[in-house]
C-alpha cells in the first residue's frame, strides 16, 4: 500500500503539466482528464480505508531511517490522513465534473483545469507529508493556485478579492514559515514525528509557546477563523462556483484545520492554555460567523460567512476534546467531542460544497446571485431547488440529514463535558442558521418568478445537475456514520490517531 502514496501528488501534478501542453491538440483534454484523475484519486483514498495497517510510510527517494534518524522526506498515511484525502478528492471530483458545463461562460478552461489539478496536488501533499518544511511547500502550491483561481473571472471584483486573499495569505505563510524556522532552531529537525519525540524529551518552554502562537495565527488565517477571517467572504464569493466549493469545502480544512490538528495533537504536548485558546476561537467563529451571514443578500457571500460559522463547530469539538485531555478528564467525552468535530468536518465539505454549486447554478441561469433579485426558481429549476433544500436542512442540523448527527455529537459532548455555555450557543447558532436558509429559499426559490425568459432555458446542464444531485444524496447517506459499524470504518481511525497524542512518532521512527 505504501507504494501508492506518492500518486496522491504525482497524478494531479502530471495533470497540471499535461493539460496546458496538449490541450492544443485536443481541446477537451482538461474536461475529460481532470474529473478522471479526481475519480482515480478518490478510489485510491477509499481503498486506504480498508488497509491492513494503522500507518503507512513512504520514503521519498529511498532515504530510510539511519539509526532512527529521518534523513529524508517521508510521506505518512494514517487514519486522519485517509479521512482528509477522501474529503479532498470527493469534493474535487464533483467540482471538476460540475465545471464541464459551468466553464462554458469562461475562456481559457485549460488554465482553469491545470490550476485546479495544482491546487489538489498541494492539498493532498499537505495531508500526506511527514515533514514540516514540505508541508509549507505543498501549502504554498495549493494557495498560490487558489489565488489565481479566485481571480479567474478577471473582473474588478475577482481581482480585488484575489489581491486581499494574497496579502493575508502571504502574511499567514510568513507566520507559518517563521514558526517552522524557530522550531528547527530549537529541535534540529523538520520531521514531525522526530520533532514530537524531541519535544517530549525537552518539555515546555517559552520559545515553544511562541511557536504555538505563530502556528495558531498562521494556520488560523488559512482556516479563516475569527479574527483571521477578513479575506474569506470576498474570495469565496468572487471565485467561480466550483472553486468556491473547493475553497470552502476542502481548502480551509487541508491547509488550516488539518495542520492545526496534526501539530497540536501529535507534535506539541497538549496544554490547557492553548487548548482553551482553540476552543474560544472556535466558539467565537461559530457565533460571529452566523450573525455576519444572516444579514447578507448576496447568495455566495452568505454561504461564505456560514463557512466561518460551521468551521467554528469543528474547532468547538476539537477544542473541547483538547481541553478535556489536557486536564486528564473523561476520555470517553473527549473521544465524542473529537469524533463530532471530525464528523462535522466531513459533513461540511459535502453540504457546503453543494450549496456553492447550487449558487453557481442559479447565477449561471439568471446572471445574478442577489437574493432580492431572484424568486420562483423552484418552478423552472426543481432539481436545483430540491438539492439546495437538502443541503440547507443539512447545514441547519435538521434530521435525517447528516449535519444533525454531527452537531448532536458535539452538543452532547459539550453537555457531558460541562461546557454548558458552548452547548447552548451551538443550539442557538443552529436555529439562526435555519432562519438564514429559510430566507434563501423564500427569496430565491419560492414566490413569484421574476425572470420571464427563464422558462425557455429550463434546468442547469447535466454535469452540474449530476454533481448537485449526488452530493444531495450524500447529505443523507453520510447520516449512516452515526451508526457504530460505519463510524468504526471511516471516523474511528482518525479519532484514534488524534487521541494517540505524543505516541505519534512510534510507528514512524520507532520511538
Image (cartoon, rainbow, N blue to C red):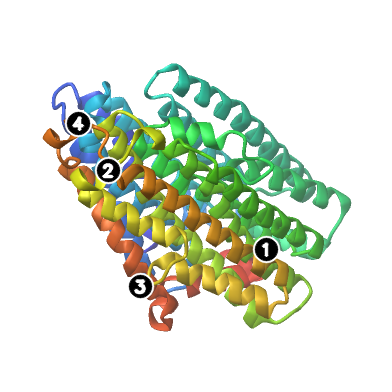
Which residue is more in the foreground, 461 or 133? Answer: 461
Mark found first going from the N terminus, 4 or 2: 2
In the rendered view, does 430 fall on the left or right side of 208? left
Tell me the residue at 62%/35% (across/down): 230
Question: Considering the numbered disc 3 on the image, is that residue within a helix, a strand or a loop?
Answer: loop
Q: Residues within 10 Å of mark 2 (few under 14, many from 20)?
A: some
Separation of residues labelled 2 and 1 (CA atoms): 42 Å
Q: Nearer the viewer, mark 3 or mark 4?
A: 4
Residue lying at 48% horizontally and 29% vertically, measured from the top left? 147
Residue beneath disc 1: 319
**Residue 340 in sight here:** yes
- Report the Cα–Cα distance between label 1 and label 4: 50 Å
Res. 452 mark: 4
Query: Which disc number belongs to residue 376?
Result: 2
Between discs 3 and 1, the one toward the N terminus: 3
- In the figure, 131 relative to 410: above or below? above
- Give the CA distance from mark 3 to mark 1: 29 Å
Quadrant of image for the N terminus: bottom left
Q: Earlier in the sequence, mark 3 or mark 4?
A: 3
For the residue labelled by badge 1, is the local secondary structure a helix, a strand or a loop?
helix
Disc nearer the start of the sequence (3/2): 3
> Mark 1 and 4 residues: CB-CB less than 8 Å, in contact?
no
Q: Nearer the viewer, mark 3 or mark 2?
A: 2
Amino acid at each position: 500500500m505504501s507504494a501508492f502514496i506518492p500518486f496522491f501528488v504525482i497524478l494531479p501534478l502530471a495533470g497540471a503539466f499535461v493539460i496546458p501542453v496538449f490541450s492544443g491538440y485536443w481541446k477537451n483534454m482538461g474536461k475529460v482528464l481532470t474529473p478522471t484523475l479526481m475519480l482515480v484519486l478518490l478510489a485510491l483514498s477509499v481503498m486506504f480505508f480498508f488497509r491492513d495497517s494503522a500507518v503507512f510510510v513512504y520514503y521519498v527517494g529511498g532515504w530510510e531511517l539511519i539509526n532512527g534518524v529521518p534523513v529524508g522526506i517521508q510521506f505518512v498515511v494514517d487514519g486522519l490522513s485517509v479521512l482528509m484525502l477522501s474529503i479532498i478528492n470527493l469534493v474535487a471530483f464533483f467540482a471538476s465534473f460540475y465545471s464541464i458545463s459551468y466553464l462554458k461562460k469562461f475562456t481559457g478552461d485549460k488554465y482553469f483545469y491545470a490550476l485546479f489539478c495544482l491546487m489538489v496536488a498541494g492539498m493532498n501533499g499537505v495531508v500526506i507529508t511527514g515533514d514540516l518544511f514540505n508541508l509549507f511547500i505543498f501549502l504554498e502550491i495549493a494557495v498560490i493556485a487558489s489565488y489565481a483561481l479566485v481571480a479567474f473571472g478577471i473582473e474588478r471584483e475577482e481581482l480585488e478579492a484575489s489581491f486581499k486573499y494574497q496579502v493575508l495569505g502571504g502574511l499567514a505563510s510568513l507566520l507559518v514559515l517563521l514558526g517552522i524556522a524557530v522550531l528547527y532552531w530549537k529541535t534540529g529537525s523538520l520531521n514531525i514525528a522526530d520533532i514530537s519525540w524531541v519535544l517530549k524529551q525537552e518539555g515546555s518552554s517559552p520559545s515553544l509557546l511562541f511557536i504555538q502562537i505563530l502556528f495558531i495565527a498562521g494556520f488560523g488565517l488559512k482556516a479563516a477563523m475569527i479574527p483571521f477571517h477578513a479575506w474569506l467572504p470576498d474570495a469565496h464569493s468572487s471565485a467561480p462556483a466550483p472553486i468556491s466549493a473547493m475553497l470552502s469545502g476542502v481548502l480551509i480544512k487541508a491547509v488550516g484545520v488539518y495542520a492545526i490538528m496534526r501539530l497540536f495533537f501529535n507534535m506539541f504536548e497538549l496544554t490547557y492554555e492553548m487548548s482553551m485558546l482553540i476552543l474560544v476561537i472556535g466558539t467565537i467563529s461559530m457565533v460571529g460567523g452566523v450573525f455576519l451571514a444572516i444579514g447578507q443578500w448576496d447568495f455566495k457571500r452568505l454561504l461564505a460567512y456560514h463557512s466561518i460559522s460551521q468551521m467554528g463547530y469543528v474547532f468547538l469539538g476539537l477544542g473541547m476534546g483538547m481541553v478535556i485531555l489536557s486536564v486528564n478528564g473523561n476520555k470517553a467525552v473527549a473521544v465524542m467531542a473529537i469524533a463530532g468535530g471530525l464528523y462535522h468536518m466531513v459533513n461540511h465539505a459535502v453540504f457546503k460544497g453543494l450549496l456553492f454549486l447550487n449558487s453557481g447554478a442559479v447565477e449561471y441561469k439568471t446572471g445574478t446571485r442577489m437574493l432580492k433579485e431572484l424568486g420562483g426558481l423552484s418552478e423552472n429549476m426543481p432539481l436545483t431547488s430540491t438539492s439546495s433544500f437538502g443541503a440547507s436542512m443539512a447545514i441547519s442540523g435538521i434530521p435525517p440529514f447528516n449535519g444533525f448527527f454531527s452537531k448532536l455529537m458535539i452538543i452532547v459532548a459539550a453537555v457531558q463535558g460541562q461546557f454548558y455555555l458552548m452547548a447552548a450557543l451551538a443550539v442557538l447558532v443552529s436555529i439562526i442558521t435555519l432562519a438564514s436558509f429559510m430566507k434563501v429559499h423564500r427569496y430565491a426559490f419560492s414566490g413569484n418568478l421574476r425572470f420571464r425568459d427563464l422558462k425557455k432555458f429550463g434546468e442547469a446542464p447535466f454535469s452540474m445537475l449530476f454533481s448537485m444531485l449526488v452530493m444531495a444524496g450524500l447529505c443523507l447517506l453520510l447520516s449512516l456514520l452515526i451508526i457504530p459499524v460505519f463510524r468504526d470504518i471511516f471516523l474511528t481511525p482518525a479519532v484514534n490517531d488524534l487521541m494517540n497524542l505524543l505516541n505519534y512518532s512510534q510507528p514512524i521512527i520507532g520511538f
